[in-house]
Image: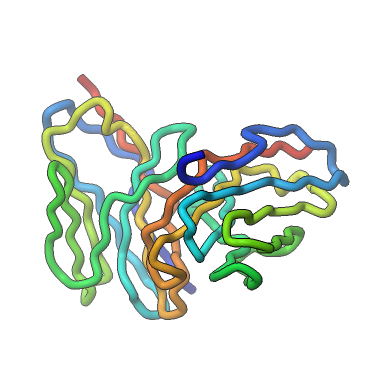
Amino acid sequence: GQNIDQPTEMTATEGAIVQINCTYQTSGFNGLFWYQQHAGEAPTFLSYNVLDGLEEKGRFSSFLSRSKGYSYLLLKELQMKDSASYLCAVMDSNYQLIWGAGTKLIIKP
Amino acid sequence: IAGITQAPTSQILAAGRRMTLRCTQDMRHNAMYWYRQDLGLGLRLIHYSNTAGTTGKGEVPDGYSVSRANTDDFPLTLASAVPSQTSVYFCASSAGGPNTGELFFGEGSRLTVL
């Protein structure tokens, strides 16, 4: 079966750096996506990786290793507004998105 | 309207009743999707539409139906609601077509079936 694993919950301190991991097993691979979802709100797109390596976008970076079935989302200079759930999703060989259950990130002052 | 609008925002429904969740987008996106989100689970695709006039089944289509009469509207119907359909429902669209994963989501419809 297809599977996306990510930690259920993480806690970090304001101003610090946090890394949210995602491992996947899917039928084929056509890209990996990270979304942010604040409580009670819609998910919003953060990043897309299809080739190995690091993609940087401001305070957020996303890394992909296709051979290891692994990605991480790196958040720097954490702000209270970064408290949210972060969803990892992989597009399989049929171009269907397979979603992880999300990682709830709690930021403490 | 800007983006995707869903209605209603929240609804409590008696089991056995029929319910239609509305979704309208003004971005002229071809591909649209309906997902349900349940605690502890990833988003699960119910139905999708790659373009007006076509629809397809996702991972959990049973008990749901959709139509896509035009580009903008993609309603989801529960013919006879059951308690297991209690969930938050998200409508989404994609600019690049069905083979892209950058989705734009509506604000969600929280449905409780008693």
Q: Where is residue B76 in the image (x, y as percent from the top left)?
A: 69, 54
Viewer-proximal residue among A81 and A15: A81
Q: Compared to B64, does A84 lie above or below?
A: above
At x 34%, y 66%, the residue is: A24
- Closer-to-camera residue (A58/B97): B97
Task: Check the image and tell me how it is coloured.
Answer: rainbow
Q: Quadrant of residue A4?
A: bottom left
Q: Nearer the viewer, residue B48 or A11?
A: B48
Query: Farthest residue toward the top?
Result: A109
Q: Which residue is drawn at 63% across and 56% down?
A: B74
Q: Could you tell me residue A37's position as x and y percent?
A: 39, 40
**Residue A15, how many percent across, how many down?**
12, 28
Q: Decide: is B82 above or below B13.
A: below
| Residue in the image at 55% along x and 59% along y | B33
Q: Is residue A42 left or right of residue B18?
A: left
The residue located at (62%, 54%) in the rendering is B73
Which image quarter: residue A70? bottom left
Q: Which of A53 and B27 is in front in this view?
A: B27
Task: State whether residue B110 is above or below residue B73.
Answer: above
Quadrant in which the C terminus of chain A appears: top left
